[in-house]
Image: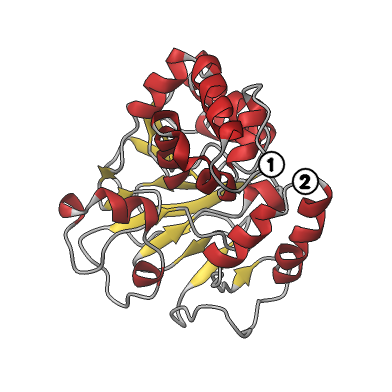
Amino acid sequence: MLRRLWHRPVALARSGLASMAGWLKERFPVLERSRVISRRAAITDQPGLASMPVAAAAIADAAPQAAPAELPDGILVYAVGDVHGRADLLQALFKRIEEDARESEATPHLIMLGDYVDRGFQSRQVIDFLMSDQVSRFETFFLKGNHEEALLRFLEQPEHGPEWANYGGRETLVSYGVRPPRSLTMNDEWLSAHQQFQEKFPESHLHFMRALDVSVRLGDYGFVHAGTRPGRAFDEQEEHDLLWIRDEFLKAGERDDVVVVHGHTPADDAYSDFRRINVDTGAYFSGRLTAVRLEKDQISFLKTR
């Protein structure tokens, strides 16, 4: 996986998006280590990878297993990781989710964990899909990710454009029909792009973005984008941590009042231990979008490949 990730800048440079490579190196110095239960060999310790609890395991295409927490009877949850502009993967995964939900009498809940936009070139289509009638049979919860926060910031203040570009904002501009500036510093190009983006960004999409929740709690699970501040009750968390936290959360050794289901930190495969479940499998570069399926005291995963 690391080989794929760190060779990614070559492809990005060819497409005029080499700036994203610098963002990746800055933002992802640590990638989650997982022990994969699948036909692939387990990932061994490698320099630069975060140390995870020995008992933890990543589960890939396995049958339902005992979950680290429990949901009330009659509730079936599918929590989907970071989509990042891959509407094609979202639609493919949702078909699997729909088929699976038909086999249960429980009420299906769809929880999207944020980061719908940026990096991939189908951000607009992702939002269109999430707002469509195709998801109407589910109880839906749409959470905000740090990338939605960045998009909203740029809509309000054009000077945030160059920073947003480092997060993959250029691809989002393209999906809305705006030519992205080449500059990584504030200039007239960004002022023009900001004005065009305001004009072309649908009012319905703006309402969707502004209405996003930052957390939801069901049973013994807490669902957020990035994670929670260790030692602080779930209902007392601050929005910035819920959208941005990484190392402090990942490396914490104790479980707080809920098992946290999150994305934000890309891993080679879905990860589950006694205190957290990560379903960010780097969809935009891996082609693998993942959802965790939770019902009563059981856990399993659905993915696009």
| Label 2 packing within 10 angstroms: few (<14), some (14-19), many (20+) | few
Q: Residue furthest right?
A: 14
In this view, 156 is above or below 128: below
Query: Which residue is nearer to you in this view: 51 or 74?
Result: 51
Q: How many marks?
A: 2
The answer to which quarter of the image holds residue 208 is top left
| Residue bearing the label numbered 2 | 16
| Residue bearing the label numbered 1 | 182
| Label 1 packing within 10 angstroms: few (<14), some (14-19), many (20+) | some
Query: Which residue is nearer to you in this view: 55 or 15?
Result: 15
Residue drawn at x 20%, y 61% is 257
Q: Considering the numbered disc 2 on the image, is that residue within a helix, a strand or a loop?
A: loop
Q: Amino acid at mark 1?
A: Arg
Residue 263 in percent (x, y) is at 47, 53
Residue 39 in percent (x, y) is at 73, 67
Q: Considering the numbered disc 1 on the image, is that residue within a helix, a strand or a loop?
A: loop
Q: CA distance from mark 2 to mark 1?
A: 9 Å
Label 2 or label 1, whichever comes before in sequence order: 2
Residue 201 in percent (x, y) is at 51, 19
* Residue 177 left/right relative to 104: right
Query: Which residue is nearer to you in this view: 29 or 214?
Result: 29
